[in-house]
Image: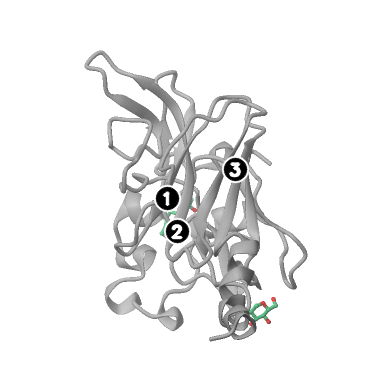
Amino acid sequence: MDARACFYLLLPFLVLLARGAGAATLSFTSKCPYTVWPGTLTGGGGGQLSSTGFELATGATFSINDVPDTWTAGRVWGRTGCATDASGKFVCATADCGSGQVSCNGAGAIPPATLAEFTLKAPGSGENSIYDVSLVDGFNLPLSITPQGSGSGCTTTSCAANVNSVCPSELAVKGSDGSIVACKSACLALNQPQYCCTGAYNMPATCPPTNYSKIFKDQCPQAYSYAYDDTSSTFNCTGGASYLITFCP
Ligand SMILES: *[C@@H]1O[C@H](CO)[C@@H](O)[C@H](O)[C@H]1NC(C)=O
Ligand SMILES: *[C@@H]1O[C@H](CO)[C@@H](O)[C@H](O)[C@H]1NC(C)=O
């Protein structure tokens, strides 16, 4: 094979290398007046990211640069009120992952937790990356997702309101000082089929919004408020973008 043929054969790989070999970046920052410990999870049996948990002080930033640009069933959340207990275990008042460490190591957030959800598609694949903010597992802190770059449809989505401040007492999770630190979904708190979209309510057509899901939707219109919330809560963006997650935007 001559050098020219060899070059053309390798060209697609050289392009991939120049682009960073199929990696996306998740960047994090926090404007919360308290420290947040973000967690990350790859769902569905996929490999975990290089960081599954870290500390983020007020105003700090952090990046994970080796996120696959095909990251699927990806989730990010923020733990609050964390400390190492007397037995040496790292525990959090909200959205703990139960690992006993700052790293979550493949464990997800224990609800209630505000979630940022991602299914990324490679650039040039012809498919859009999808992202949303979900309150289906309840709420613990405000967050936003901002795609980086200029792809089409790449708009910010957020739950910027503090839902804890309007959380009905039957859904409220209280911290050690008695203040409301998180707000359970009605499904988690009351475990009834009309709130969980189970049984006779297991289809979008038979599981309408409820007085509880409406509280979440009123506060955060862009976020998923229950399992079959309308699809306006799903955002999509032409492939390959990286994303900024801001806590307390
Ligand atoms: C929601 O509706 C249920 C059933 O009608 C009622 O028991 C509950 O008090 C209502 N809660 C709120 C917060 O409106
Ligand atoms: C992507 O977003 C556009 C505009 O919001 C919408 O029309 C389209 O249906 C969405 N596509 C997917 C796959 O969600």
Element type where label 2 sits in the image: strand
Of discs 1 and 2, which sits in the foreground?
1
How busy is the neighbourhood of tag 1: few (under 14 within 10 Å), some, or many (20 plus)?
A: some
Q: Earlier in the sequence, mark 2 or mark 3?
A: 2
Q: Which residue is mark 3?
A: 142
Does label 3 or label 1 sit earlier along the sequence? 1
Instruction: Place residue 34 in its image quadrant.
Output: top right
Report how far apart the C-alphas of labels 3 and 1 lie in the structure. Answer: 23 Å
Distance between the alpha carbons at the discs numbered 2 and 3: 18 Å
Q: Quadrant of the C terminus?
A: top right
Q: Residue 52: x, y in percent?
A: 41, 43
Which is more foreground, mark 3 or mark 1? Answer: 1
Residues at discs 1 and 2 in contact (Cβ within 8 Å): yes
Alpha carbons under labels 1 and 2: distance apart: 9 Å
Q: Which residue is mark 1?
A: 49
Query: Can you say whether 147 is above or below 113 in the image?
Result: below
Callout 3: SS: loop
Tell me the amino acid under the disc marked 2. Gly
Identify which amino acid the numbered label 1 is placed on. Answer: Leu
**Disc 3 crowd, CA 10 A, few/some/many (<14, 14-19, 20+):** many
Q: Position of residue 20 (x, y in %)?
A: 60, 59
- The reply to whether dot 2 and dot 3 touch (C-beta < 8 Å) is no
Q: Between 15 and 209, which is closer to the camera in this rendering?
A: 15
Left or right? Give the position of 164 relative to 150.
left
For discs 2 and 3, the disc positioned in front in the rendered view: 2
